[in-house]
Amino acid sequence: MTDVSDQMIEILDRRVERRKERREFFRTAIGAAAVAGAGGALTFAGSAGAQSAPTDVDVLNFALNLEYLEAEFYNVAVFGTTLTVAQTSGTGTPGIATGGRKVVFTDPVVAQYAKEIAQDEVAHVNFLRAQLGASAVAQPAIDIGVTPTSAFSNAARAAGLIGAGDAFDVYATDENFLLGAYIFEDVGVTAYKGAAPLITNKTYLEAAAGILAVEAYHASLIRTVLYAKGVATPSLRTSADAISNARDSLDGTSDLDQGISPTGSGATAMSNIVPLDVNGLAFSRTTGQVLNIVYLNKNAVGMGGFFPAGVNGTIKTSAAN
């Protein structure tokens, strides 16, 4: 019994040590929120200088841009088709999704998961557009291609997965597809959690919470499959960890993101399917931090990466890190 207790203590100690910096981040964030509330002034990240708080429409349209990206990627990967004009029209500068092709899945379980996620993401697009009505932004230009200069290749290169001039084809294998999905899913969860305090209408907040829950299921599923496949292919876990580190390098100095490699070893080893803090809570990203990742730029910019012409709506500039 003593050995078991010692092992459990060691496991907990490892987890606490690894997330010490994350705990400090949350304390700082809570303190900053309290100061902002006391001062009676609200700002939102991702813009040059302080601005008034975004409206619920602004926040939902920001989310819609991200849903366009996910829906296009999965729809092309699973069905070989992009969204229709009726699903992508709206205010702002309209664009199309370019690049990509249908994946020839070899693992039937991955194929079924991919189909379910694709349908969920399209449903999110349709739902948000219905809630926004005439205020819905159009889909902006989206890069989901596989050329050496495409967003996926640049993201893989930033993670050290490929060299200069190489291309990363996320549609070539089940494993590449999973890594491509991994780039998006964790970001989607942190984006919805970060946006929750900005939403004032309870009906919209409940809807956003519902989408957050689904995105969390998706992220956990992708992480679980990558983790399981990484048992036989450790390099797959290493690749996922490298993507996590690349995201961290883009969204600021805090070590928030987490890969999927297990912590500990032997009897003390445990998985890391759920990225959370010492309190068991998922972490948040500001709108600016989210844009840092999808723009693939750690500076304050208005376009790039998966959105070569930027997103549509009022929240469109990444954070300066």
Image (tube, helix red, strand yellow):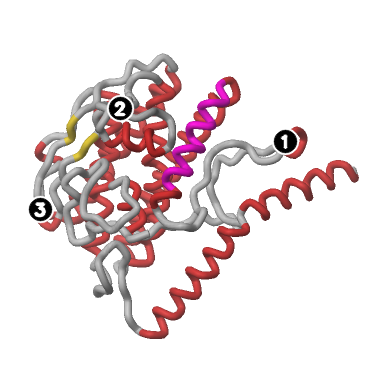
Give the mark count.
3
Judging depth in this view, the residue of 282 and 148 nearest the camera is 148
- Quarter of the rendering containing residue 1: top right
Q: Which residue lies under the disc numbered 1?
A: 265
Mark 1 or 2: the one toward you: 2
**Which mark is first along the chain, 3 or 1?**
3
Tell me the distance, in whole angstroms, between the alpha carbons under discs 1 and 3: 52 Å
> Under tag 1, what secondary structure?
loop
Judging depth in this view, the residue of 192 and 93 nearest the camera is 93
Please state the extent of the stretch shown in magenta in the rendering: 233-247
Q: Which residue lies under the disc numbered 2?
A: 165
Q: Which residue lies under the disc numbered 3?
A: 92
**Which mark is first along the chain, 2 or 3?**
3
Query: With respect to residue 48, does 164 lie above or below?
Result: above
Tell me the distance, in whole angstroms, between the alpha carbons under discs 1 and 2: 37 Å
Instruction: Give percent across and percent down for residue 5.
Output: 84, 47
